[in-house]
Amino acid sequence: MRPARITTPLATSRRTLLAGGLAAGVWSVVGAPVPAHAEPSPMGISWPGRQELPTFTRPRHLDALMMSDDTAVDVQLLVTTLQGLVNRARPEIYVVRGNTTEGKETWLEDTRVPYRLLTDPWQLLERHLHRAKGLVVYDPEVVETINVATTVASLRDGVIASPELVERLSAAPYDLPVLDDFRDRFETSLQATTWAFENLWPQTSHRVLFGINPGQSVPVPPDNWKDFQELAREERPIRDSSNRDVHAYDMADFLGGENVYLRFQDSQPADGWGPAVHRVTVRADGEVVADLTAGTDAERAVLFDKGNSTLKPQAGTNDAHRFADGGGYFVYQLAVPAGTQTLIVSVDMWNQYLVSASGTAPAVSSDDRRPASQQLRDYAVATKAMPFWLASNDSPEETALLERIFAAVEKGTPYLGWFTDEFNGVRLASRHGVYTLAADFLENATVFGGVREPVRPQRAPAPPALANKVYLTFTFSEGDNLQYDQHRMRQLWDHPDRGKVPLNWSVSPLLLDVAPLMLSHYLRTASPVDTVVAGPTGAGYFFPSLWPADHLPRFLADTRSYLDRPGLDVLYALDDRDALTPESAAAYNEQLDLRGVFYNMWFVRSDTTVMDGNLPVSTQLAISDRTVMVERIVANAGDFDGSEPVFVAVGVPAWDLHPGDLVWVLDQVRAQVGDHVTAVRGDHFFDLLRQAKGID
């Protein structure tokens, strides 16, 4: 038996509309909460108080724009904000940019909504731009003004435009007035976001947050590093800091200018354990002229190019360090005092480093940004929210503002988009009771939120009889990621080898609101060996050990229906620690009716702990290389001596492997271990494990 359902009710509604958050007359829900499954008004959005994300009006006909990847960014931004404005009343615009992994018209066809195909954005604009009341102009030199302009446009029923487009859009046949102009208003993106928070935030909806990156790195030319000379390379596959040392480099060959440049890369990028640098000390003619510890203001000041590096702050006895894995790198610009004869740079570092230097500045830094368009912007416009983009690490000022925004919403608020650094971002959000829905490349949420599709709960067939075997179960990662659910998962789902091996497919329970069609499709077309499980870490992605402890039980209870309605009784959980805390386990066990929990996916062993009396929590192996996956499974299967069953949970990196890989993995494991190895669905895995351990 699984844990009994809780019978003590908590609050019936997590939140109602926030004061000042919604403009009167726009929404179909104002004031007191309405029933959780209320239909939307004939024209507008329905957002009951107990519903995490809004329901849009049912679309009748769509103009489907297949927009090429090379469409000018300012046109993409114009189209996306127009889409949000128009679809707020009733979805009429569907936009696909470039090619999608699942096929450009796959989900569109599944909606069964009549549509007209367009390929020229200006055809779409000519049909719909008259719906906008005007233009809000952004400053391409300060990319965060794109988000500021988006907020103003959403509040004033306008669209955003670049300076280059204003002249065309102000003239016939569009004749759109300029509602506001943000050129030359701010010097930095932080200034722009701070102004928006202080001036626009009170007018916006606070029921959902949007982290939308309005910029992208400028292209780095292939010859950007032509003047750099290699100084040192770690050839050994070291991942455990066992080679930590202080290395001194003579920079005499690079003197002659005002600066020298030091670049750190991963010497073995295929396995992603690149250089970790704690401290850099610069001595000019024997005198210390710079002493830089990772994460300090002094260290950040000399970063010429962060290059997708990550800062890991001090944690206990583990020193702060900057690291760059895979294709990442970082470059320091170190000032050389006038007249310097000798320059020695000492570096405290470890793992797989490749160090090079130059006396000539690279032509480009990837930190330089230019405007970019992300598909999620239509959703922010439609919901009249305030999109923003703030660093979750490596910028104390931006992180402080990010925390101010998190603190300004009710606990249990969703954050859609992404972060500059995943783990630091999720940590910050979790501490404030905000959960994350990775969604920066989610397309057409303003359409799919209006497409009705019945979601019938999955029913598990009877499990096989318990036997003395090695039981494996495979769980695809990434289900919390809405854009994965839309794109990569559909590609994996349509793989010809799906159904040959039992697989667990993590999904976001919030698809019930965002795209019930997608959730319904996966549940309806699942094979007998497919199981849909709740992705990290319930309604959304958060670290339960960091969530406010007094609120976690209430949040789980308030969002329980998102698991119950589709029949998701197995949970894939992530946390910022090696083991689920007893307090978190108790909250999950008391508030959710779970068969069991798959926990994290970075272990070399899969072990099960029974927590809170009767909740099995199984750690997962996780390897992106299928050959190494076989080795790890075989090693775990070595625990089997024939006297009792052995249970091994395997996390599958969804970006790297597909169902055919797992058919191969299972065949290889059986060839090495024997036929007493069997793969089972996740629900059966926990049913059998409960029987084996005598758990009620």
Image (cartoon, rainbow, N blue to C red):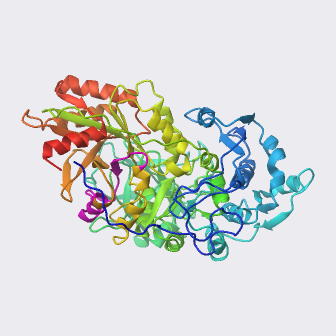
Observer-nearest of 12 and 467: 12
Mark yes or no: residue 238 visible: yes
Residue at 72% x, 36% y: name it: 115
Return the residue nearer the eye: 455 or 419.
Answer: 455
Where 361 sits versus 411, above or below?
above
Residue 542, horizontal then vertical, whole percent: 40, 59
Residue 6 falls left or right of residue 224: left
Query: Which residue appears at 71% of the width and 45% of the height?
Result: 93
Residue closer to the observer: 556 or 339: 556
Residue 497: percent from left, percent from top? 40, 25
At which x and y percent is residue 268?
A: 38, 42
Dividing the picture into quarters, in which one does residue 502 lie? top left
Q: Is residue 463 left or right of residue 299?
A: left
Q: Position of residue 526 (x, y in %)?
A: 42, 33
Q: Residue furthest right?
A: 172
Q: Is residue 440 left or right of residue 41?
A: left
- Does residue 123 belong to the magenta stretch? no
Left/right of residue 312 with respect to residue 615 in the rendered view:
right
Judge whether 461 appears above or below 477 on screen. Answer: above
Residues rendered magenta in the picture: 565-589
Residue at image location 49% in from the left, 73% down from the top: 407
Q: Nearer the viewer, residue 28 or 614?
A: 28
Number of numbered labels in the structure image: 0
